[in-house]
Amino acid sequence: MSEQNHDPVILKEAPGTLDGMFSYLNLQEGLGRHRELLAQAARENISHEEFLKRLLSQEVSAKFTRQVDSRLAQAKFPFIKTVEQYDWNHPREIPKAKILAALELNFLSNREGYVFISEHGLGKTHLAIAIGHKAVQAGVRTYFTKAIEMVNHLSAAQADHSTEKAMRVYTRPALLIIDEVGRLSIDQKQGEHIFNVIDARYERGSTILTTNRAFRDWSKVFEDSVCAKGIIDRLVHHSDVIKIEGDSYRIKDRKTKGLAQQ
């Protein structure tokens, strides 16, 4: 039997100083602030428990911030919008109370969702992202996708036999936001991809979907009306429908700019 050569395992002695210990444990907040907190503890004559709590709270806060930043990157939002930035006075009709309730995020624990229906330019994507952003800040794994980008991804995955891996992108997040369903016509295969995602998430995760078409018009968007009905059936069973009516923000801005230039 041939002998196998292995590199020797070198065990480094654990550091003995506070700075060394913080660095060794990668507690960067403690490394930077422990002397300040020690001096503060001496001045205020606080207990050992309170000192330790203050020290660790810095680490917890920093770790949570890093996690939120990571989840924001993973969510793939095209931009960040908050509910505070939304102009509630512009739409002619909007169920504000229902949207504010959604921001409490209680629907997530029940694996429910929302369908935003409005014409273009009334902020449905803005509001969907605002809810998603709030979810990310609460520690919820969230993912945003345009409907056409999702079906193109799944179509490509089917072609190279990686559908299972691609599906996990859309089934693993606790909250999935599918934007702009109905913006373009959806052929039979694309409809099947959307159905498969909605069906896989049905009663397993929360979905927010935005569309510019009322459900009664989906037969004009989807080539396969049976597939469209299957998607609608699963959505409405555990989703609250939010309809927004009014004129497009973009048209309003264009008119305002036109008047300003006269």
Image (tube, grey):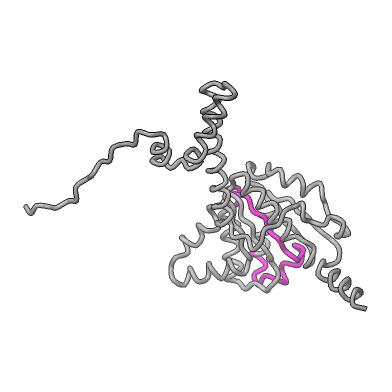
Q: Quadrant of residue 257?
A: bottom right
Quarter that holds the C terminus: bottom right
Q: Quadrant of residue 170?
A: bottom right
Task: Identify the residue shown where x is 73% and y is 56%.
Answer: 127
Task: Identify the residue shown where x is 74% and y is 50%.
Answer: 240
Place of residue 174 in the rendered image (x, y in percent of width and height, measured from the top left):
58, 49
Q: Is residue 52 above or below residue 160?
A: above
Please name whichever residue, 45 or 23, is drawn nearer the observer in this view of the structure.
45
Please name whichever residue, 36 or 26, is drawn nearer the observer in this view of the structure.
36
Query: Does residue 237 appear in the picture of this structure?
Result: no
Q: How many marks?
A: 0
Task: Identify the residue shown where x is 75% and y is 66%.
Answer: 212
Q: Looking at the image, which residue sits at the far bottom? A: 262
Q: Is residue 152 above or below residue 50?
A: below
Q: Is residue 115 above or below residue 228?
A: above
Q: Is residue 97 magenta?
A: no
Place of residue 32 in the rendered image (x, y in percent of width and height, measured from the top left):
50, 41
Q: Is residue 223 magenta?
A: yes
- Magenta segment: 202-227
Place of residue 72 in the rendered image (x, y in percent of width and height, measured from the top left):
59, 54
Please name whichever residue, 9 or 142, is drawn nearer the observer in this view of the structure.
9
